[in-house]
Amino acid sequence: MKPIVQISLDLTNIDEALETAALAMRAGVDWLEAGTPLILAEGLHGVRALRKAFPTTPIVADLKTMDGGYLEAEMMAKAGATHVVVMARAHAETVKCVVKAGKDFGCKVMGDNMICEDMVAGAKWLEDLGCDYIIHHIGYDERRGIAAAGHRMPSPLDKLREVVQAVKVPVQAVGGLSLEQAIQCPKYGAPLVVLGAPLTIDADAFKTADGNLEASLRMICEAVHAQDVPAFA
């Protein structure tokens, strides 16, 4: 598959999210993500607003589902989400329920391996349960806590190639990547490039970062779209 650029709208105001989404689409972004902060603040209304404004654009609802999987996926799919996220640390039945809802309502399922003791095994487990995509994820609090303790901050790039080689579904890497690292993800075999905090969003205030965001996003999209994903992916 050709590389895809996804922007995570990690915002708490739907008007700002819509403005940022419109800017991102003009710059060449392929997918929109209703980030967890936006879902917490606006819920289904936020996803519906994105769907109304962008009727043909894939929309990822970053639910981070841990329980009640079928209902959460059903609600978001009916609101207009094309992709929903379930966590690997959820019970297997929850993952199965999200996958079932995805099939029933035409929504793809992204399995997130955050906090797995063995992240490669976690990714494979999610694939085996029917997830359509893998999110290889080092969490925000985890990264900051480890760095605050004086240790090297972990990166999803550390085991990204291992995760990619362990599964047959597309992989995306999330969690503290620099701009240069995010652009390089397709070279690791991960075709879904996610842009969000801290690349295009102020990670502490959860608002759009200052500067010429549209020009930056256009440059990023051009760099990502020009790549080919290696055959081993």
Image (cartoon, grey):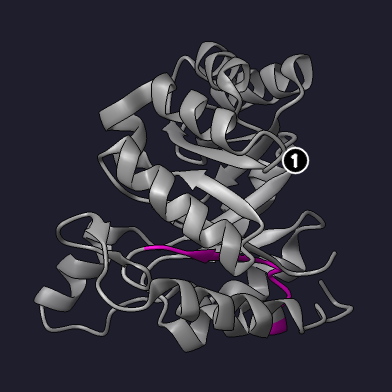
Q: As displayed, is residue 88 above or below residue 121?
A: above
Q: How many marks?
A: 1
Visible in this render: residue 188? no
Viewer-closest of 36 and 190? 36
Q: As displayed, is residue 137 above or below residue 3?
A: above
Q: Quadrant of the C terminus?
A: bottom right
Who's the residue at 19% across and 83% down the image? Answer: 151
Expressed as whole percent of the image width and height from the top left, the position of residue 91 reads 50, 27
- Decide: few, some or many residues near mark 1? Use Cα within 10 Å; few <14, some 14-19, many ≥20: few
Residue 233 covered by magenta stretch: no
Quadrant of the rendered image containing residue 142:
bottom left
Expressed as whole percent of the image width and height from the top left, the position of residue 183 reads 58, 82
Viewer-closest of 216 and 109? 216
For this orientation, the residue located farthest to the left is 149
Q: As displayed, is residue 174 above or below residue 150?
A: above
Q: As displayed, is residue 92 above or below residue 194?
A: above
Looking at the rendering, the stretch of residues picked out in magenta corresponds to: 187-196
| Label 1 secondary element | helix
Expressed as whole percent of the image width and height from the top left, the position of residue 217 reads 51, 74
Who's the residue at 61% across and 39% down the image? Answer: 54
Who's the residue at 65% across and 85% down the image? Answer: 223
Visible in this render: residue 198? yes
Viewer-closest of 95 and 194? 194
Expressed as whole percent of the image width and height from the top left, the position of residue 186 reads 69, 77
Q: Which residue is mark 1?
A: 128
Q: Quadrant of the N terminus?
A: bottom right
Who's the residue at 67% across and 42% down the image? Answer: 58
Badge 1 amino acid: Asp
For this orientation, the residue located farthest to the right is 231
Quadrant of the rendered image containing residue 224:
bottom right
